Image (cartoon, coloured by chain):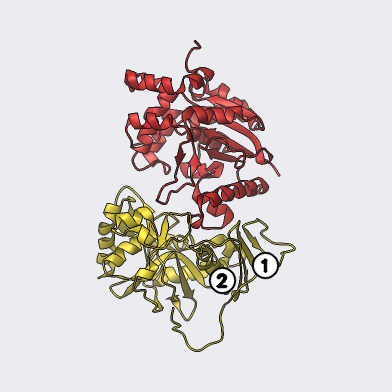
Chain colours: A red, B yellow
Amino acid sequence: MSGLYWLASYPKSGNTWVRCFLAALSAGGEMPDFAKLTKTARASAARAWIEEVLDVPTSDLTQDELVLARRAMHEIQTQTPELSRYLKVHDRYDPVLFAPEITAGIVLIVRDPRDVAPSYAEHMGVSLDYAIELMGRPGRKVADGEDYNLHASQIFSSWSDHAASWLEQSASQVLLLHYEDLTDRPVENFGRLAAFLGLKPDSDTLRLAVEATRFDVLRAREDTLGFGERPVQMNRFFRQGRAGAWSGVLTESQADRIVGDHRAMMIRLGYLPEG
Amino acid sequence: MPWTGAEVATDVTIVARPIVEEFSDPISPQRWVKIDTDGSILLTIPGLVRFLVRHGKSVTVEILRDEVAQGWRLFLLGSVLSMLCHQRRLLPLHAATVKIGGRNIAIAGHSGMGKSTLAFSLMQRGHGLLSDDVTVLEVNSAQCGWIMPAFPRLKLWYDTCRALGVEPETLPRVRDDLPKVDYGRSIDFDYTPGPLDGIVILNEAAELKLVPEPKSHAVTAILGHVSRRRIGHLLGCDRSLFAQAAMLSSKVEVLQLSRPKQFELLPAAAVLIEEHFGR
């Protein structure tokens, strides 16, 4: 049995970008069809994936049973060599779902919450102010309403709590990746990721995979071929991909509110100077 | 439900008792669905129910927890029904079936695509319901797509009920802890077996349109909507399922209904289907 790697992040923090890189790396440096991203890493909470692995209809399961189903699905994935060892996760850390005995490692991808907010607002089709409010809501649970959701319910909690939960668990090793470092020094930081995952690409393959998944390349590909994971309310999934773009988007009070909500974690992650 | 067939011996026996049987060397050992070398299946929904499904003829049920809603029945009438079908080489299509203009049309789609919702919308427009979620088809040299009678059930989420003018609190829940009700007891259900005339496969897209599935894709599209297909695969049904899908695709019209998943577009989607198949 081999453990799984959790690609953990708050939404809109680069998780899909990382999955694209891993897909390209496993294809020898070429970006495969977007449709094949699911071969690289499915979402742990995706009902379609739970059903595919467990053979049970999830729409008749209660949320408590779905937690058991996800855990069982993770276990099966560790025992089935032909299935990927990577899973995309937006939940905060949960010691049952992501138990150390089924874990090989945690990749925590973080991004300046001031850049997350505009992207998240567009992703959900809500106002920027509301997205900022949601990001500050402790214990926030999603996909837990009166409708069918393509995902099982998940606890994201607030942006700060989300990061803290993964950083403060000590049972499994964590690679902390900053979105901003992936944009600034992609070869170095995607290389760190590959090494953490036990992959040993030669430098050419690593460079090719980084080139093939540059943000402008992914964006052009989405323009030409579309992207199946794009929510219908978004014009495009791969938007700007720039670090620090928030300064031209957020009002001063919106930026201040984010800082007010998340100051301690922003300092801890280097998004604000200390003091 | 009334029995509509000839006088015959018991077809499937369902017994409630503790399940003590173990599979010594299962071909699929996972805890929720275990499959034994003889094709017997043990389905476990932890803390709720266990089923032992054998030879397409016998179901043993062990209820582990009682709910007011008796939610264990969902799995008997869903997964277990599909398992029995695979064991009997019947084709369980993941579809609701509606009679439109005298023609039986299966509304197929993956979970969450809105099969029951669209079926309900069509029902509200006066069409009859023949099945929800699983449509059992007999497909062989004698019958190319014969719908077997089902049972009156239509599972709807609370938000669907509200959007379509039904107060969900007045209806029985399907699970105690799930905002989902059974509308089946409130409808005039159609138990008549009959030929399948069309399959409409639901997809989510930005634009509403109903187009024929290209012939080259129709077999794959049908296979992609076989209920619990992997279990069929593990039971050695691949060849028979492929042959059945090929027969169906040659005799039955297969269409794709692409649509944004918005309640307000349901009438327009229903009209497209009505215009195609006739009122």
Residue B64 locus on image (x, y percent)? 61, 62
Residue A34 locus on image (x, y percent)? 47, 41
* Quarter of the image where the N terminus of chain A is located: top right
Disc 1/disc 2 C-alpha distance (Å)? 18 Å
B45 over A42 or under it: above or below: below
Who's the residue at 35% across and 64% down the image? Answer: B119
Q: Chain of mark 1?
A: B
Please give the label number shown on residue B19: 1
Q: Chain of mark 2?
A: B
What SS does tag 1 mark? Answer: loop
What SS does tag 2 mark? Answer: helix
Q: Which residue does the numbered mark 2 point to in the structure image?
A: B84
- Give the number of the mark in front: 1 or 2: 1
Residue A61 placement, left or right of B105: right
Number of callouts in the render? 2
Which residue extends farthest top? Answer: A275
Please give the label number shown on residue B261: none
Residue B135 locus on image (x, y percent)? 45, 69
Which numbered disc, 1 or 2, marks the residue that appears first in the sequence?
1
- Can the viewer see residue A139 in this picture? yes
Who's the residue at 35% across and 55% down the image? Answer: B160
Q: Nearer the viewer, residue B94 or B169?
A: B169
Residue A56 placement, left or right of B276: right
Residue type indicated by callout 1: Ile
Query: Which quadrant of the view contains residue B144?
Result: bottom left
Residue type indicated by callout 2: Leu
